[in-house]
Image: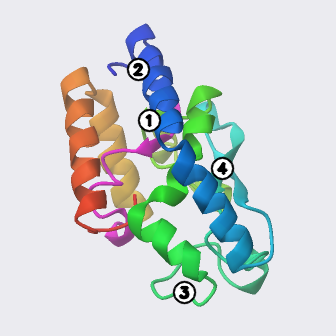
Amino acid sequence: MGKQGSFLKRFTDILISIIVLIISLPFFLIAMIAIKLDSKGPVFFIHERTGYKGKPFRMIKFRGMIDNALAFGPELTQENDPRITRVGKILRRTSFDEVPQFINVLKGEMSIIGPRPEIISITNTYDDYQRKVFDYKPGITGISQINGRQKLTPDQRTKMEIEYYEKENFWSDLKIIFKTFAVVFTNEGNI
């Protein structure tokens, strides 16, 4: 992992993404079929987020809400949100809805570990300090995702992320990976 932009971090991102996508392929196909059978709409939810250097990118997830859910309510998902489908509840509980983001990692738009890829309407309100988070590629998981991101304010989250990524190293990234597995397998929350 290591510092942003390092060869080791990029190589690790690519290697892990390929392995995860190959291993998860049967479940990927099952999820696609289940989503189509459960509700109308596309299999994937593609949403524009703020990425590295503040540039927008299209983040890919499995769709876990009714089609066109954003037209029926706020962008931020609430607990027990009625827009979440039956299959979506399972995908979110297991964090499997995030697996398509490994495609974003392969494309170089995201990293496995990095700041949370935030909604553009939120990042448009960032002050100069919060904008430092754009110095790092957004991640599938990261320090705020494993430390109760749902309970953190945007200020708390970006402060935590900036402090972490300014000191990021291979071993601290490895700890985040193991903690991510713990969070997912103990159902402590959606990554």
User: Of callouts 3 and 4, which one flags the residue occurring earlier in the amino acid sequence?
Assistant: 4
Which residue occupies 52% across, 34% down?
22
- Identify the residue at horizontal 41%, vertical 20% (top origin): 12
Indicate the secondary structure of the residue bearing disc 2: helix
Amino acid type shown at disc 3: Asp
Q: Earlier in the sequence, mark 3 or mark 2?
A: 2
Alpha carbon of mark 4 to alpha carbon of mark 1: how far? 14 Å
Q: Earlier in the sequence, mark 4 or mark 1?
A: 4
Amino acid at circle 2: Thr
Q: Disc 3 and disc 4: Cα gap in Å?
A: 20 Å
- Give the image location of residue 146, x and y in percent: 29, 54
Residue 98 horizontal/vertical position (percent): 52, 53
> What is the C-alpha distance between the residues marked 4 and 2?
20 Å
Above or below: residue 51 compared with residue 125: above
Which contiguous range is marked in magenta?
Answer: 134-152
Mark 2 = which residue?
12
Name the residue at the top extreme.
7
Q: Which residue occupies the foreground of this view, 21 or 128?
A: 21
SS class, disc 3: loop
User: Of helix, strand and loop, which one carries label 4?
Assistant: strand
At label 4, which amino acid type do we have? Ile
Label disc, if present, on residue 81 of the rendered structure: 3
Image location (x, y in percent) of residue 23: 46, 38
Spatial CA span between label 3 and label 2: 36 Å
According to the picture, the residue beneath numbered tag 4 turns out to be 60
Image coordinates of residue 166 in percent, x first then y, are 31, 29
Q: Is residue 24 above or below residue 187?
A: above
Closer to us: 175 or 152: 175
